[in-house]
Amino acid sequence: MNNKNDFYNSFRAKFAFFLHPNLGIHLLIVLTLNLITAVTITGLFEISKYPLIKFEIVGFILFIVISTLIEVLTKIFILRYFILIVLKSFATVFLGLQILIFYVTSLLFKEEISFTGSKILSILIFTCSFLLLRTMLIIIYQRYIMKKR
């Protein structure tokens, strides 16, 4: 990419694979969006009397930080070596990836965080809700923040 305008108009930026050309800033943006999304989803399900997650606050934050790092690293790897699979699956491969990431990360923090009820169903509901809300937040970010640059 020759300049920032090329980046912001690129295929990867439009589909939110990368939200900033600098990887460090991209990680901070994704981490912020993931924290906002996870807290919102957890709160909405708590209000509706269907809690998906039992957690301690520090464990919950670590859960989101570690899952974000794993997500970004695996997305970079997949987009570099398996882009055809992503395109042929219309990026639904990332749904399965996110479910797997949340499951593995929850195993790392057994004492601090656990999905309630049917663990598989709770992870599936949390992941689908998480991805939908995060996609909306990314669209808002792209429309208002990236357009100003």
Image (spheres, rainbow, N blue to C red):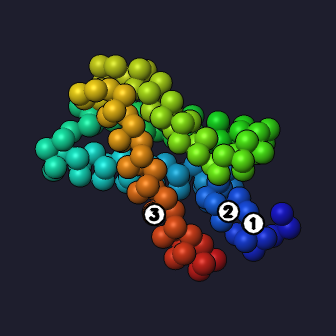
Report, in whole angstroms, how far the alpha carbon at label 2 lies from the one at label 1: 5 Å
Residue 20, compared with residue 146, is above or below; it is above
Q: Mark on residue 136?
A: 3
Mark 1 and mark 3: span between their CA atoms?
19 Å
Kindly identify the amino acid type of the residue bearing the numbered disc 2.
Ala
Residue at 32% across, 26% down: 119
Is the N terminus in the top left, top right, bottom left or bottom right quadrant? Answer: bottom right
| Residue 104, placed above or below residue 19 | above
Residue 10: give its label: 1
Disc marking residue 13: 2
Q: Mark 3 or mark 2, which has the lower sequence index? A: 2
Quarter where residue 71 is shown: top right
Three-letter residue code for mark 3: Met
| Mark 3 surroundings: few (<14), some (14-19) or many (≥20) residues within 10 A | few
Instruction: Give the secondary structure at mark 2.
Output: helix
Mark 1 residue type: Ser
**Is 14 situated left or right of 52 in this image?**
right
